[in-house]
Image: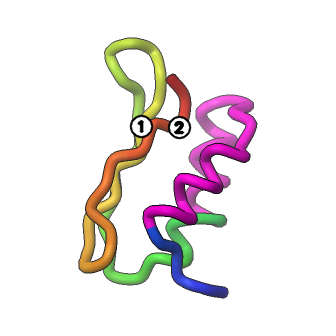
Amino acid sequence: MAIHTAETIQEWIDGYTFVDNQTTSQDILKQVLGNLPDHGFTYGPTESGGYELAINGDSINDTFTVKS
């Protein structure tokens, strides 16, 4: 599998249908983060009730809105 870029992650998020937090967490781990060696991440709720994914590493340092 190819390593993700910020653009491919945003494309994945744009095409993703949020089901619930648990399912989305599992999907992010399998489909996004599994292709990002040497990157740290946080995923969780925002104060406004949405969910964000922050990825930090050599090639990606971005925060993505998974659900607004």
> Residue 64's x, y, as percent?
42, 44
Q: Give the range drawn in magenta.
A: 6-30
x, y percent for residue 2: 61, 86
Check the picture and name the quadrant holding the N terminus. Answer: bottom right
Q: Residue 52 carries which label?
A: 1
Mark 2 highlights which residue?
A: 66
Residue drawn where x is 55% and y is 74% of the image: 34
Around disc 1, counting alpha carbons within 10 Å, would you say few (fewer than 14), some (14 to 19), or many (20 or more)?
some
Image position, residue 49 (x, y; %):
45, 15
Q: Which of 59 and 32 is in front in this view?
A: 59
The disc labelled 2 sits on which kind of residue?
A: Val
Which residue is at a point 62% across and 38% down the rendered structure image? 22
Residue situated in front as seen by the camera: 66 or 29:
66
Q: Is residue 3 left or right of residue 55?
A: right
Q: Is residue 67 above or below residue 9?
A: above
- Classify residue 55 by image quadrant: bottom left
Residue, far bottom: 1
Count of numbered marks: 2
Examine the structure image and report whether residue 19 is included in the region drawn in magenta: yes
The residue tagged with tag 1: helix, strand or loop?
Answer: strand
- Residue 23: say if magenta: yes
Disc 1 residue type (three-letter) = Glu
| Crowd class of label 2 (few under 14; some 14 to 19; many from 20; radius 10 Å) | many
